[in-house]
Image: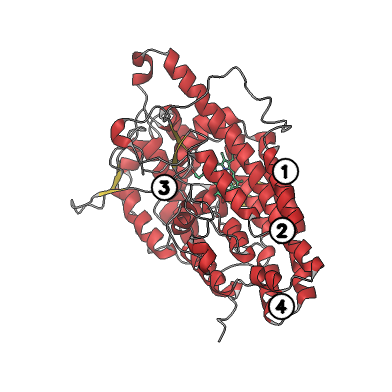
Amino acid sequence: MLPPIPALADYGLSPTHGFLPAVLPLTRLPDPYYNKWEAIAANLQALILSRRLRGVIDRLPVLSTIGLEHDAEWRRAYSLLGFMAHGYIWGGDSPSDRLPASISVPLLQISERLQVPPVATYAAVCLWNFKPLFMDEDIDNLDNLATLNTFTGSLDESWFYLISVAIEARGGPIMSLMLTAIAAARHGDAAAVTRCLRAFAERLTDLTTILQKMHESCDPTIFYNRIRPFLAGSKNMAEAGLPRGVVYEDGSGTETYRQYSGGSNAQSSLIQFFDIVLGIEHRPTGESRGPSSDSDKGGRSSNRHNFIMEMRRYMPGQHAQFLNDVSTVANIREFVEENPRDSQLRLAYDACLAMLSAFRDKHIGIVTRYIINPSKQVRARSRSRSPEATRHRVNLAVASRKNQQNQKGTGGTALIPFLKQARDETGEPAVEEWTRRFMKRQIKTEGKGDFFLGKPDHGAPLETEDVEVKGLAGSWTMDEDVGGICQY
Ligand code: HEM
C-alpha cells in the first residue's frame, strides 16, 4: 500500500504561508516575566556597540520557560535568545567560547521543545522574525514587511532577512499545489499534474525576481563585515577564535564544548521541498553522476551524508519531518518518465527544473558578490597590513586566511563548486534533450552580462592557494576548481 500523502496541518504548516507560521510571529512575549529578555533584544544594537551586552547578560537571572504557553510564544523566545546568544558570542573584540546559564538554560529547553539547535538558525532570524506593516496586505510583498530583531539595526540586515521571508511567503502555496500533483499522479491524471507543474514554474520565476531584489538594499560590504559575523556558528571556527566551539553553561560544571553551524538560508525547507518534489538528487560535493553511483540504482532519495542533508538538522523538527515524509511519496519525476508521449507534461516538468536552476544561478551570483569578492578584498588588505594592526580583533570578518596545516579538512570543500553542483544537479532529471542543452547554455554564460557582478577582473592574481572562506553555515575553500567530499 502507498504511504499517505502528508497533510500540511499535521506538521503545523500553512497552505498559504508554507513554512512561515500560520499565526504571525509575536512582536513581544505577553508575560511581563520576560520583560528583561525583551528589553535586551530591543536594545541589542546599542548594547553591542557599547560593549555592554556581555555584562548585562552575565547579570541576567536564569528565567524559567514555565511562562511560555502557545507555540508562538516558544518561537518568539527562541528567536530572542538566538539573537542574544550570537550577540554574546560574537559581539566583542574576540568571541566568547562560553554562553552563560541565563541564556543557555532556557535556550536549550526551548530548542528541545521546538526541535531546533540552540543557535540563531534560519528559523530564528527569518521564519519567526518578521511582521507585516499593514495587516490587510500580503506578506509576500517586500513593501509590507519589517523585521522584529536585528543585530545591527541596519536596513541591510533587515532586507537580507526579509528577502527570504518574501520568498517563503510567495513560495508557500506551491506546497499544496504539489501535494495535489502527487495525488493526481497516483490517479494517472496527467492533465492535473501538468496544470500544477505550470503554476509551480510560474511561481518559481517570481521567487527569482524576489531574490534579485537583494541587490537593492543590502550592501555587500556591510553584509560581509557587519552582518555575516553575527550569524556565524561554532563549528570549524578556530580561525575566528573558537577552536573548540562553545560551552553552554548550565551550572552543573560538567558541560562540554558544543559545535554548531551558523544560520544560513541553506536551512530553508522550501527550497529542499522543491528538490524533493521534483525528484532532484544532491550528491556529496565533488561526486559526479556515474554508472556506479547509488542514485542510478533506484536510491533516488539517498540519505548519504552531504551538506544539504546536514542542513535539515537545522530546520524546525516538524518541517524536517515533513520533508522526510514527502520524500516517501514524491512521484512526479517517475510519472513524467512513465509518460514519454505527453509533451505538455514533459514541457511543464522541464520548465520547473529550468526555473529552479535559474534561481540557483542567480544565487551563485549573489554569493560571489556578497561573500567571494569581499573575502578577496579582506585578504588583499590583510596581506598589506602589519600583524600588529590586525592582532587586536578576532572574528569572522577577518578570519578568511590561509588554512593552517592542522586545520586541513575542516573547510575542505570549495564554496562555488558546491553551489554549482547543486545547480547542475537541478537540471539533471530534465526529460527533453532541448531543455538539457538550454540549461548547459545558460550555465556557460553565467556571471557574464550580470550587472551586479561587473566585468571579470583580468588583472587580479589567480587564486590557487588553499584559502578558507566562511560561508554562512559552512566553511569552504576559495579555490573554484576544487571539489571533494563536503566537509565543513
Ligand atoms: C546575501 C544573500 C545570500 C548569501 C550571501 C548567501 C550565501 C550562501 C552560502 C555561503 C551558502 C553555502 C552554505 C553556507 O555556508 O551557508 C548558501 C547556500 C544556500 N542558500 Fe544562500 N545566500 C544568500 C541568500 C539566499 C536566499 C535569499 C535564499 C533563499 C531563501 C538562499 C538559499 C540557499 C540555499 C537553498 C542554499 C543551499 C544550496 C542550494 O540548495 O543550492 N540563499 N547561501
Percent x, y for residue 229? 46, 35
The label shown at residue 261 is 3
The residue that disc 2 covers is 352
Label 4: which secondary element? helix
Residue at the spot x=50%, y=42% of the render?
42
Residue at the spot x=53%, y=72% of the render?
325
- Residues under numbered marks 2 and 3 in contact, where contact means CB atoms less than 8 Å apart: no
Which circle's residue, 2 or 4, is located before the other in the chain? 4
Q: Amino acid at mark 3?
A: Ser
The residue that disc 4 covers is 184
Label 4, label 3: how many angstroms apart (C-alpha)? Answer: 39 Å
Q: Quadrant of ligand 1?
A: top right
Q: Viewer-nearest of labels 4 and 1?
A: 1
Please tell me how crowded label 4 is: few (under 14), some (14-19), or many (20+) other residues with Cα within 10 Å.
Answer: some
Q: Amino acid at mark 4?
A: Ala
Q: Which of the 4 quarters of the picture holds residue 19?
A: bottom right
Percent x, y for residue 26? 55, 56
Query: Disc 3, ligand 1: is the CB inside 8 Å?
Result: yes
Percent x, y for residue 222? 56, 29
Q: Amino acid at mark 2?
A: Cys
Label 2, label 3: how many angstroms apart (C-alpha)? Answer: 30 Å
Assign the C terminus to one quadrant of the image: top left
Q: Amino acid at mark 1?
A: Arg
Which circle's residue, 2 or 3, is located before the other in the chain? 3
Assign the N terminus to one quadrant of the image: bottom right
